[in-house]
Amino acid sequence: MTSQLDHKGRRLAQNGLIGRRAMAWLLTAAITLLIIVGPARAEEAVILSSTAPGYAPGTAIADGQTLRLPERTSLTLLFRSGEVLRLRGPLDRSLTQLRAGSRETSLQSLAAALRVNGVDAAVIGGTRAAAAQRPDDDDVLVSLERTATYCLAARTPLWLTRASTGPLLVGLKREGTLREVRFPDAADRIEWPADVLIEDGDTIAFVTENGVPRGAASFRKVDASSDLAWLAQLGLLGCTDQFQAARRDLEARKLLPE
């Protein structure tokens, strides 16, 4: 966000359209956006599995969130890197508190340091899912009738799925612009229009030809080299349906750490 605002500011200044006061406003806005976005990026781990009550797979865990695990329960956390850490109860600390006093940066070293301090922690994994290059050509189906977040890789094929009811003509609305698409009579899905470009963080609403809202899609761009790193990003960015589907797929292929 900062680079886009800064680039736009320089371009306008060169054209003589804004002065120093406007440039200062743009920089202030960029800093404000960083402050707003900052806390969301503090979520570094997502729950992969749990035997503790109240911790569902796919839930993001922020650094400062206290983890309360009763005795004989466990929590398996998947980090952005694709590394996996299992913690066993009893435990009543946050990730920030668990890291306190440890100068080690690797997850293996951190787990070892935690064990020295009485925390039952272990790095698990070593599966093909953690090391294999993840293909980014899996189809993503966008529903017109739901509001959801979708994660996209560099070459992800994107499709619009036909609504179960209503007209075949649908409008894609974004920031005052409207692009109409029409489903052929026999088609249950169509390719995403090539002229509707998507950037990270975009939200597009779906409306009928009369302007009645049906649903909306938010998009996040993801760059992950392995299946587990991809799975972590799906959970951390709120792509809930994709996370659950990818998790089931990896579990069926016996690629999830046990």
Image (cartoon, rainbow, N blue to C red):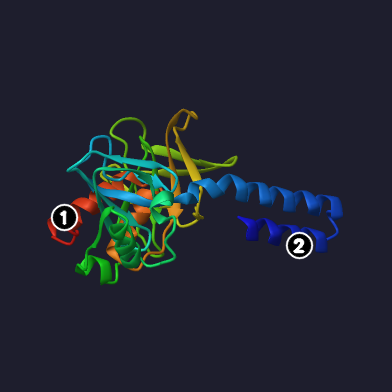
**Image x and y of residue 182, in percent:** 39, 43
Q: Is 102 placed left or right of 258 in the picture?
A: right
Residue 140's tag is none
Q: Is residue 19 visible?
A: no
Quadrant housing residue 102? bottom left
Q: Is 181 placed left or right of 189 in the picture?
A: right
Q: Nearer the viewer, residue 168 or 23?
A: 23
**Image x and y of residue 241, in percent:** 30, 44
- The residue lying at 28 percent from left, 52 percent from top is 119
Identify the amino acid type marked 2. Arg
Q: How many marks?
A: 2
Q: Nearer the viewer, residue 126 or 194?
A: 126
Quadrant housing residue 1? bottom right
Q: What is the spatial separation of the Cα atoms under label 2 and label 1, in whole angstroms?
A: 49 Å
Of circles 2 and 1, which is in front?
1
Q: Does residue 110 sit above or below 63 in this rendering?
A: below
Quadrant housing residue 68? top left
Q: Which residue is mark 1?
A: 251
- The residue lying at 69 percent from left, 62 percent from top is 7
- Mark 2 crowd level (few <14, some 14–19, many ≥20, 10 Å Cα): few
Q: Nearer the viewer, residue 155 or 74?
A: 74
Q: Does residue 144 sit above or below 192 in this rendering?
A: above
**Image x and y of residue 118, in percent:** 28, 53
- The residue lying at 48 percent from left, 43 percent from top is 204
Identify the amino acid type marked 1. Glu
Q: Which residue is mark 2?
A: 10
Secondary structure under tag 1 reads helix
